[in-house]
Amino acid sequence: MIDAINASVASEEKLTGASEPVVEEIYAKLKESGFDSKQVTTLEFNSFLERKLWPGFETEKASLAHLITIALLINEKVRDGSVSAWDSVAARKEKFSGYFESMLELWKSGRLTLREKSHVLQFLINCFQSLEQDFVRECCLRLTGLQSWFHLNDLHREKLLSLNKKLPAFWKKVQKKYADPKTPQAKHERNFMSELLDEFLASLEKFGELTDLGVEELSYLERCIELMIDLLDQLPTRRFFRPLLVDKHVVVRCRGSKVAQLPQARLVNQLLGILRYYENFEIDDTTGKPLSRREVTDLHYERLQLLQRVCFQEFSDNPSLKQIMLVNVAKLDTREALLEHFEPLPFEVLKVLCAKVCYLDVSRDTTLAAMEQKVRDAMAAQEAQEAEKEAAEPKKKKRRKKVKTEEEERICKLLVEILVNRLERPVMQQDDVMKMPLYPTEDLIWDPNLVPEEHYSGDYTLALPKLNLQFLTIHDYLLRNFNLFRLESTHEIRDDLQDQIPRMKASADQDGGTHFSGSGRMMVPLGGLEVMNVKRPKVGEEVPSEVRAEVRWSLTGVLPQIREEWDTLREHDVIFLIRIKAPEEPYDGRVADLTVAEFPEKFGVVSVRGAEITELLDDEGNVISDPNPAERKTPVGDGRVARVILDPAQYHQDLEAMASGKAEIYSNLNLVLRRKPKENNFKAILHTIRSLMNNEDTVVPDWLHDLFLGYGDPGAAQYWKLPTTLSEIDFRDTFLDEDHILESFPDAEDIDVPEDLKRPFKLKFEAVKGTGGASTLSSKRPQERVIASAYTLPNMGPYPECMPRENSIRFTPVQVEAIRSGVNPGLTMVVGPPGTGKTDTAVQVVNLLFHNFPDQKIVLVAHSNQALNDLFEKIVALDIPERYLLRLGRGIEELDAKQDFSKWGRVNHMLKRRIDLLAKVERLADTFGLSGQDVAYTCENAQHFFLHHVRYRWEEFHKKLSIVGKNGANIHKVLGKAGTKKRRLDEEAAEAADGRQNEDENSEEVKRIREQLLSGQKTVISVLFPFTKFFADAPQPLFPSESHEADLEIAEGCFRYFENMFREIEECRAFELLRNGHDRGDYLITTHARIIAMTCTHAALTRSTLVNLSFKYDNLLMEESAQILEVETFIPMLLQNAESGVSRLKRVMLIGDHHQLPPVVKNRAFQKYGHLDQSLYARFVRLKTPTVDLNLQGRARPSIAELYSWRYKDLGNLPNVLTDDRYRYANPGLTYVYQFVNVEDFEGRGESQPTPYFYQNLGEAEYCVALFMYMRLCGIPAHKISILSTYNGQKALLRDVVRTRCSWNPLFGEPAKITTVDKFQGQQNDFIIAT
C-alpha cells in the first residue's frame, strides 16, 4: 500500500500540481486503509502537500478527495511538530480563504462519513490553535464573531448587549449585514457554529439509540468537545462563542444523554469535565478581566434573584413555587435543595422556567423540540389508551392519577438538571486544587486514562489541558501547567517504580508476609514509619496544617557507592513509601509485556505514598544532611532515620478512608524509593504553582502582562516603546575604539564621535526631529542620533589587581543592539544560533547593569548547571568583584570552578576575606606605630581606626599640600610635622604647637629634599604621602614623579584603595555579627549578593523561602530559555512579593534558540497533545514578539555551519573562522571536514533493546571508538574530542567500549565527554563524533 502511494507521488514528479485522478486514487487507498497514519506519514515525507496538493489546488475544481487530503497532511504536520505546519501553506496563503470556505461547505453538504468529519474537526482544531498565522486567524475568527448571536435566545442577547455600551452599536451594523446573508461566506459566518452545536446534540441523541457505540461515533463526539474546549480557552473565540454554548446547555445535555452512561464513554465524560470548567471559568468575557470570588458570588445571587422574580411574575398562584420566592439564598442554592423544589414540577412549568431563567426555549431547539414532540405523542397515546379503557368500563368513574411517560420523565429530568446546573452554588476551581494531594498515589500512577502510555500517536483525543498561544488569565495559565506537570511527573515516577520494584524480587513467606530477596540501586526495604506530629488545621480548613513522621531503613550489605548516594539525600528531597503484598505466584515474564493497569496486580503493589525529607540522621542521631559541607558529619553505622513531612491532604483522605472501614496504610508500608535529585523536583514546583494560584500578589510587570497571556501588541514590551527607555547609557568597555562605535549603529541617522576618543564610552541617543519619539502605536523605531563621549576611570590603587579588567571582544552591531536592549527596561529576546556569542552578550549586559545601577540586584537563571558555569567564568573575568556573586543550588558541586560560588562557599569566603582584610588593617596600624591597640580585633574597631587615623592622616596630608605648594617652597613649614607631631586633643595646644618652629629652614634634610624637588626626582606628593610604608609591597617606585598631577592621582588611588578596603570590611561586619551559618547565608542572599544565579529548577524549589526572606531583585536574565518549560520560566519572574500590587521587575532578558532542542518531556501524549514541551520563549516567538537575531557565528568552519545555517535568518561567519589557521587547514588524518558514515549490521546485529526503549547499536559504538583511537594516533588531543549519542542506551554502551578499549591505555585515554545530545546542549568541542 505504501509503495503504491510512493509510486503515485513519483509519477507526478514533473507536474507543478497533482492531477485529480492521482489524488482520487491516493485518497481511495487512504480511505480503504481507514486513513492509516503510516500512509499519511509517507505522503508527508514525500512532501505531497508542498509539491502537489497545494500548488494544484483550485477552489472551484477541488474534489472532496483533494480537500480532505490537504486537511490530513496539515493535521500530520501539526502532530509531528518538527517544522512549522503552515510554512508550505503560507507560500500561497491567498488560496487558504477559498480552501477554508470549501471545507465549511463540504461539512454542510452531508457527503462526509463520521471518520471524515473527525478529520475535518481535527483540522478546525489545528486552525483555531494557530491564530498566530494571519491568514488562518482571518478565516477562523469570522466564525466566532458577533454575527453568531443571531442564534441566541432573545432575552439572553438583550441582556448581554446591555452589559456593554459598545456592543449595541456593533450589533446594529451586524444586523444590517447578516440579517439576510447573500453569500455562502456570510451564511457560514452567521450560522456555522450554531449549526455545528445543533448537529453535535442531534448526533448525541441519535447515538444514544444505537445498541453498540463504535469507535467512529466516539471519536466524532470527542473531537467536537475538544473543539468547543479550544474555542472557550482563548479569549478572541470565547467572547462570542460561549453565549451560544451556554444557551444550548451542551454540558448538562451531554451528561444527561444515554451515551454518557456507557462505560466506553469515559473519555467523553472527562472531556465534558474540562468543557464545564472553561464554560464556568471566572472571567469577564467582554473585558478579559478575571473575576474575584466576590464578583462570582454576586453573579450567582443575580441568577437566583432572577429565578425568584420569574416565579413571582409567572407563577404567583402556584403553591409549590411560593417557597422559592421567599426562601433565602443559603437554603436554596445547594443541589439537594434545588432538586427538592424542581423535581415535582410538571413539564410545562419547567419549560417556562428554563426559557426565562436559563434562556433555553425548548420549542426553538431542534433536538429538544423533537423530544417535546415525542412527549406529546406519548401523552396523546396514553390519553387515548385511557379513553378506550373508560369506554370499555363506563361504570367506573374513579379519577385515575396521571402517570408520567418515559419520554416525559426524561425531558423533565433534563430540564431540572439544566436549572440546577445554572443555579447551584459555584465551586471555585482554586479550592479544589488546594485540596488536591501533590504526591501521586497508586490510583493515579497506574490509571492509563489519566496518565497515558509513553508512546502517543496523536490519532485520538485526550482529556488533557493544552498549552497554546493564549491563556484566559494567569490563574488559567498556572492551572494548565499544574495539571500537565503533575501528570508528567507521575509518568516519570511510574517509570522509576516499574524499574525498581521487579528488582526487589518480592515473595510471600510462610506467615503470609512479604520477603525481598533482591536489591535495587534506588530502593531498599523500609524498617518502619512513625507519625510524630499532626498539627491542627488552619482556620477554615479541614486538612491538617502539617504532618511530620520518621522513616527508618538500613543500608547493611549495600555497596559503598550506593550507600554514599543514599547518604546524599538532602532537605526537600522526595522519597516514596510503597507497600508490596507479594502475589502467590511471582511474575516471571517481561515487564515490557505488561500493560499499565496489569503491573500493580502482577507485582502486588498496594499503596504508594510520598514524603519530603527535612533531615537525615545516622545511627547516633547525627544530622548528615546539613547543606553546609563544612558542617556535614560522616555517617555512623548502617541505620538511617529520615525526618519527613507527609502530604497533609493525602493523610486526611487516608484517615477518612480508614474511618469508613478501609485498612490502615502507613504501618504496612515496606519499601523506600529514592529518585535522582535532578528528576525529583516535581513536588516543589507543584507546591510553588499552587501557592501562586492562591496568592493575589501573583503579578507580572504591567508591560509584560498582555504579551504573557498572548494578547495585544507583541512588540509592546520593547525598550524603545516604553516610557522608561534610557536616553544615555554608560557602555564602559563595550566598544574597543571609535571605529567600533561607528560600525555598531548602521541604522542611526547620525553618529557624532569626537576624535581621539578612548574608552570607556558613554553614548547619548536623541530622536531625530520629525520622526517622533518612542510610541507604542508605531511598529518601526524612530530615527535617532548617537552622540559619543568618554571619561576616565579613577585610579583604584597601586596594585596590579586594582586595574580594571576590560572587555576584549569586538561585538557585532546585532550584539550591540542586544546589549542596549538588555540594559534598557523592558523585554529583550535574543535568538542565539550556535557560536554567535550569546553568552558573551549576556555577560556584557550583566556587567553594564552592575555598574550602571549599583542599587539593583540581578538574577541569572539557566536550564543547566553548565550554562551557569559558563556565565560565571566570563563574569569573573570582567570588572565585577567576585564577592557580589552567588550561586544557589547543588550544581556548584559538579563544576570545575576554582572559586566556590555556592551559598556556603561565599559565606566561608567572606569570613576568610574578613581575616585577610583585618590583617591588612593590623599591618597599616603597625606603620603608624599603633601596634597592640586591637585596631583589627573586629570590623567595628577597624572602622573606628579608619575614621580616627587613616582619614585624619589623609586630611592632614591635603592641608600640608596646600601649605607647601606645588613646587615645595614651604616644605620647611611642614617637614618636621611629618611623622613626628602627635595628634593633640586640646585645640589650643595644637595651635601652639603649630606656632613653634621645630625645624631649621637651612637644615641638611630640608636642603636635600629641596634639591630632589628641584631636580624632579621627587614631588611634594611623594615626600608628604603618609602611607608610603604600607604600600612598600606595591610595584615600585610608587610615585614616578613625572608630574605633580600624576603623583596626586596615584595618591588619590591609594586612598581609594583604603576606602574600598574598609568598605569591604564594613560588608564583612554582618558576617561577624551573625553567629549562625543559616543567618549568614540568608543575609548573603537578601542583602549582600548583587548577582545571584540558579537553575530554573532551584528557583521553583526555593521560591517560598526567598519570598519569606523578603528577597528583592530588579533584573532577570535567562539563558537557554528555549529549553525551559513554560512554568519554569514563569516562576523565576515571581521570586519576590509584589509591592502594592505592582511587580518590581524592570528587565527580563530571554536568551535562547527555539530552533534547537525544546524542553525535555518524556511522555509523548503530554508533549504532542498538551504541548508541555513548548517553552515561554518559543511561544513568544510564535506570537511574533520582536527578537534580536545574532547573525555571525565564530565557532565552526563555514562548511560545517552551512549544515544548519538554513534554519536561521542570514547567519554568516565572523572573520576568525575565515582567517584563523585552525579553520583554514585540514584536520590531521581526516579527508573531510564532516562525513556521514553508514554502519552496516555488526556480526549480523544492528539496533537492539536490552530493556524497553534502551536503544543500542554495537556496530556504531565500535566504529565511533575506533575512529576516536585513530584520531588520537593522528595526534589530536583527547580533550578536544567528544562522542555524542541521541540515546541513553548508546551512551552507556559507548562508555563500556571506551573503558574496555582505551581508558587503561595512556596512548588513547578517554574523550572529553561521552554523553547525550541533550546533555551536551550549550557546550562545544573541536571534534564531535555522533552516533
Image (cartoon, rainbow, N blue to C red):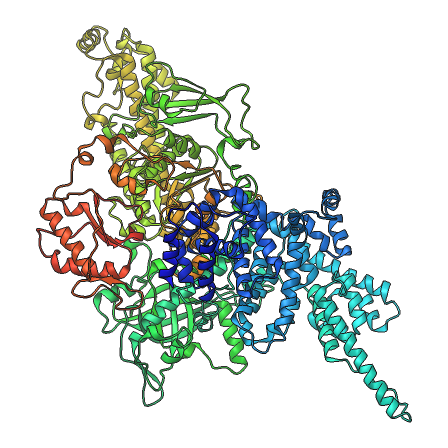
379 versus 485 height, above or below: below
Which of the two residues, 172 or 756, is positioned nearer the viewer here? Answer: 172
Query: What's the residue at 53%, 54% (across, down)?
Result: 63
Q: Quadrant of residue 1009?
A: top left
- As drawn, is 993 to the left or to the right of 282? left
Query: What's the residue at 19%, 20% (across, down)?
Result: 1037
Which of the two residues, 335 or 189, is positioned nearer the viewer here? Answer: 189
333 versus 17 height, above or below: below
Which of the two residues, 34 or 1165, is positioned nearer the viewer here? Answer: 34
Residue 199 visible from this viewpoint: yes
Quarter holding the C terminus is bottom left
Quarter holding the N terminus is bottom left
- Where's residue 286, x and y in %? 66, 48
- Where's residue 172, x and y in %? 75, 44
Which of the two residues, 344 or 289, is positioned nearer the viewer here? Answer: 344
Residue 1138 visible from this viewpoint: no
Q: Quadrant of residue 1113?
A: top left
Q: Quadrant of residue 9?
A: bottom left
- Where's residue 850, x and y in %? 39, 34
